[in-house]
Amino acid sequence: MQGIYAITFVAFFLFIASVLVTVIFRSRSRKMDKLISGIELIAGWELNDEEKKAYVNHLFITEKGKNGGLFFVITLFMVLFFGLFIVFMEEGKWAMFLFFVGITAVIALFAFGMPYYYRFRNNRGDGYVLIGKKYAYVNGTFHNWDFPLSGLVKAKVIQKPFYGMLLHYYYYDRTLRNEEVLKIPASKNIDMKEITEKLKASNNYGCI
């Protein structure tokens, strides 16, 4: 009987999880449809090869630097934590040391390998940019700040590392507040000031 209860509980949990995933994906699909149909669209353009390359390289450098810093901090704490165990343990020091090396290797693989994976994926992006009232689609990646406890912080024209737009938005999840900063390239003939002003106005408050 206990086995049946356990299976029932797991099945119920998987059902709830699948429903939530379906709702989230359908919600994002509807928002994407609004962008494509033009209902929520403010502006859209296609990146040329040079603009796309600059965008992908900027993301790669940013991600690589951020991951390198996190890896250093995590490794420092792990050295202190495992170092104390290794020093004071009478038995199993080599096992603990090998475990430390293995964990460090796995973290290093993700920290330094993921930026290359993302660069590969971004290079295969479609190069389209769609800016909506509370959404943005950039080179195959969809961003939105229309959920409760989320919003636009900043929208402005930038000249470096390329001409375009900076979007800064926040959202809350199980890790509390998260912030995303997007730097989106554009051709010089696109009036980014007008687009950013429309974006600010559509968010109903004075973002910077």
Image (tube, rainbow, N blue to C red):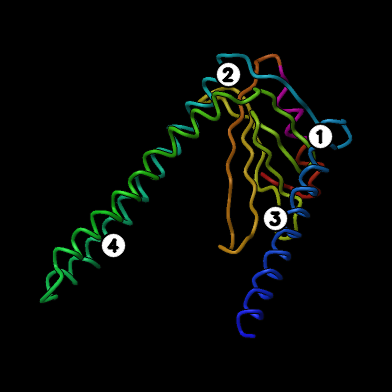
Where in the figure is residue 51, as x and y percent of width and height? Answer: 58, 18
Q: CA distance from mark 4 to mark 2?
A: 40 Å
Element carrying mark 1: helix
Quadrant for residue 194, please give it. Answer: top right
Compare residues 206 and 89 and report the one nearer the observer.
89
Q: Which residues are magenta?
A: 190-197
Q: CA distance from mark 1 to mark 3?
A: 19 Å
For disc 1, the neighbor class at 10 Å (few under 14, some 14 to 19, many from 20) is many
Residue plotted at (32% across, 55% down): 73
User: To which residue does mark 3 refer?
Assistant: 150
- Residue 196 belongs to magenta span: yes
Q: CA distance from mark 1 to mark 4?
A: 45 Å
Question: Is 154 above or below relative to 79?
Answer: above
Residue 82 placement, left or right of 149: left
Q: CA distance from mark 4 to mark 3?
A: 32 Å
- Identify the main secondary structure in magenta: helix
Q: Amino acid at mark 1?
A: Leu
Decide which of tag 2 and tag 3 comes sooner along the chain: 2
Compare residues 6 and 104 and report the one nearer the observer.
6
Q: Quadrant of the N terminus?
A: bottom right
User: To which residue does mark 2 refer?
Assistant: 51
